[in-house]
Structures are given as C-alpha cells and as structure tokens.
Amino acid sequence: MAEFLQQVVSGLASGAIYASLALALVLIYRATDVVNFSQGEMATFTTFVAWSLMNNGLSYWPAFALTLAFAFFGGVAVERIVIRPVEHRPEIVIVIVTIGLLIAINGLVGWIWGGETKTFESPFPNRTFDIGGVTMSVQDIGTLGVCLVTVLVLWTFFRFTTIGLAMRSSAVNPAASRLLGVRVGWMLAIGWGFAAVLGAVAGMMAAPTVFLDPSMMLIILIYAFAAAVLGGIDSPIGAVVGGLLLGVIVNVLGAYVVPAELRLPTALAILLLVLLIRPQGLFGHLAVRRV
Amino acid sequence: MPLLELKDVEARYGAIRALHGVSLAVDEGEVVSLLGANGAGKTTTLRAISGAVRKTGDVTFDGRSIARHAPEAVARLGVAHVPEGRGLFGELTVWDNLRMGAYVRGERKTFKQEAPRVLGYFPWLEARKNQQAGTLSGGEQQMLSLARALVSRPRLLMLDEPSLGLAPTVVRELFGIVKHLNAEEGLSVLVVEQNANVALDASARAYVLEVGKVAVSGTSDELRRHEGVRKSYLGY
C-alpha cells in the first residue's frame, strides 16, 4: 500500500507538469481556437533562458522569476508578430503556423545553445521524507507545489481582476467584447503570454529529471495533449485535473501493469479512448454547431 | 448638430453590397427607429456605426468622424450597441456580464457607481447574479443585455431588434424602460425593429430602409399615416 501511494505521489508530480502545459494549451485553445503545437518548444526555449541566467551566476529563484517575465513578454510577442497576421484565417492556417513555430524555435534553441544535453539545477534538495510510511521525495512535492501555486495565481487573476474578466469574455464572445470596448487582440496576446509562463514553469520543473536538450518537451507535450483531451480541451479545470489524473494513471500502470517503456503508448491509448467514448472530455463542452 | 449622423454610407460583405448610401441622423435626447424588412440593411447600418463592418461614406458622432474607428474605439466614445442575438457571454455569470458593461469606463469604479441605478430598472438581476447568463430565458437575456449596455452610461444606445422572439408583455416592458430612460435621463436611442408598431410608439422619428437605402423617413406620426408604410409594415 505504501509503495502504491509512493507511485501515486510521484505520478502527481509528473502530472502537475503535464497539467501546467495542458492548461497552457487550453488557454490558447479557448482564446484562439487552435491547439498551439509550439507550446512545448516555447517552454524549452524559456528553460534554456533560465539555464543561461543560472550559468551566468544568478541563483535559482531570481532566475526562475526572470524567466517567467521573459516567457510572458515572449508569448505576447509571438502572438502579436506571428499569429496576428493570420488571426482571421481558417484554423488550419493557424495550426500550420504553430507547427512552423515548433520547427523554428527548435532550430533556434539548437543554434543558440547547441544540441548536447545539459544538466539543470533543481531548487529542491535531493532528499526524501516519510509520512505514515509513505516515502516522498522533496523534488516531487516541490514540483507539485510550484505547479499548483502557478495555476492558483492564474486562476485568481482570471477570477478577480478586470483584465481577467475581459480575457474570459473575449474567449467566449470576441465580437460582443469589442462592442463593449475590449481590445480583443491584446487579450489574446496576454493569453499567449500566460500560456508561455505556464510552459516555462513546466519546462523548469521537468528539466532536472528529463535533462535539458532541444527536444526535452516533445514527450511532455504529448502527455499534455492527452491530459487536455482527457479533461476537455476547452476546460481549464479539466486541464489541471486531466494532467494530474494522467500522471497518476500512467505512473501506476507503468509500475504494476505495463512495462515502464509503454508509459507513453499508454497515454496515447487513453487519449484515443477519451476521443472515442467521451470526446468532450471530463469537464469540456460538446461543440454544438447549427448547420 | 446631430449626435449621430450618417452620410451616404455604403457597406458590403464580400461581393454583396448591403448598404447603398444610407444617410440618417439622431439628435441628442431623441429616440429614432430604423424599420424595414429582413435583409433591408438595418443590422448592417448599426454595425457600420459601431465599426464592425467596413464602409465608405461618413459617420460622425458628436461632431467627429468615427468612420475609421474600430468597435472598441466607438464604444469608448459612449456608443452602446446591443447587437443582434444580444451578444451575451453565455458561460459567464449574470454579474460578470453586467460588469463587462462598465469595462469601457474603468470597470470597478464605474460598476460601483452605475450598478444601483441599473438594478433599479432590473431588480431581479441581483437575485440571479451567480447564474450563467446562457441559462436565462430569452426575455431575461434581452433585459440583461440592455442592463449591461446601460451600466456604461452610454450617450447613444443602439438596440438591434430587441423584440425578436419575445412575448408581447416582455416587449412592452422593455420599450417602457427605453421610453423611461429617454424621458428621465435624456438617453439618445437608435432602435432597429421589424415590429414597426412597437417601435413607432416608442420613437419620435423613424427611417424605413428598403434594399440598403432609406426609402421613407419622418416623424412617427407621419409614418403611421404614410400609406406604403402602413400597408407594408404596420399591417392595416
């Protein structure tokens, strides 16, 4: 039992990383109506920025904070410069642009930082502790904590600020929002900024265990897709619950049922099952379209 | 000088020309209705005013041209447009919808100031504040949409077919509030309607649009007596 709970906790830790990135996907999906395929690469880029900051003498948390600021403005800039020109084109055009971004950012990371794997410092000590016979690593609990705090801060922003309200209204009904004086384009850009911040958190939390290299987020992005679909691609709560749930399911199945090498295929199987049985996910809405 | 003036406004959706040179005016403190059949260009006229559709010709509000303004810029000048289909945020609460009305003038302060006044007209909104707007009835949604527009304390209120799909008692209540706002607060209103009887009762003047052009205009009394208008729009 204790060992099972251990697996659950470490599943929650990786699940929190999937949840952060899944939430980033959902934010952009709600605002722009497309899945941002470059979300993982944007996260990789910002994680490399954090690595450079620390390599130049900054300690972890200042580097962390600076990286989040960089991610925010970077996300806003990507929306304004790359997405805005195709904003009103069919969704497939925007999707292709995000795939182009994926390739471009991936190349850029390789060009700036080189292709070899780097180690990334963890802010948490490499220790474990016991609660009622269940051994937990500080790393896992810390990761879970940082991701959940980030999500909570964002939720508070959306729930209690005027800009948060305007961002929600822009996502629900952009035309009506404009008639009420909202600069919807900027709301989208801020949404991209927040998504990039979430990605940066996911990247920096993942990097100590998966190591830093240009394609470090590739697998995590696939988990995040699965998590977002599991929770409902248009549901922020769904992304968080879906991420945590997926982390636990995959970890537990990987420990007891399927070989560890089959964790990723297991996640893809879950993705497929959700799409077949409940396409709107756990918390999502079925898109009803009048023809 | 009229509060709102359109001069020779033309608008098109792709290859289809929707407005063929519309000219009209709304004076300060006046209720004006815009009548016409489906597809006559009533909605497009409102959209042209609020900047939601590209056009040629000139639109002036309070003496300055707004022909090139984006919708959010027109809204900031004090034009509240209650669009076709009401433009509510169905997933958001009633209260969040109302708060969005105040956004254009600094949400927190404006909402605190204006909410009590608006709730005076729609007291039931407070009890439903946490309900999702999309779960309200059609009449309630129309009222919420009007209330949201009023929270911004607009200089010009534009209503697009407020009576559409509503029960006659609800329509009467709604136009009663509009008339009251005009009489008590001097609110200027431009209302688009297919229901000409209701609209003419509430307005001092009216324009009748036919295929993207003003076909007839005059005071509401003149239009009631106008034979063509009577036959085509009033049904007697």
Image: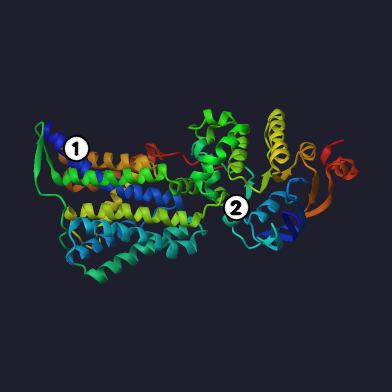
Residue in the image at 16% along x and 52% along y: A123
Give the distance between the C-alpha atoms of the residues marked 2 and 1, in whole angstroms. 52 Å
Q: Residue at x 61, y 60 (%)?
A: B69
* Residue B40 showing in the rendered view: yes
In the image, what residue type sits under mark 2? Ala
Secondary structure at numbered mark 2: helix
- How far across and down, in percent of the image, does residue A275 sit? 38, 42
Chain of the residue where label 1 is placed in the rendered structure:
A
The quadrant of the picture occupied by the N terminus of chain A is top left
Q: In the drawing, does residue A180 fall left or right of residue B62?
A: left
Question: Which residue matches tag 1?
Answer: A8
- Amino acid type, residue under disc 1 in the picture: Val
Q: Nearer the viewer, residue A242 or A160?
A: A160
Q: Chain of mark 2?
A: B
Give whichever of A206, A250 is nearer the camera. Answer: A206
Q: Residue at x 42, y 45 (%)?
A: A161
Q: Quadrant of residue B116?
A: top right
The 10 Å Cα crowd at callout 1, few under 14, some 14 to 19, many 20 or more, is many
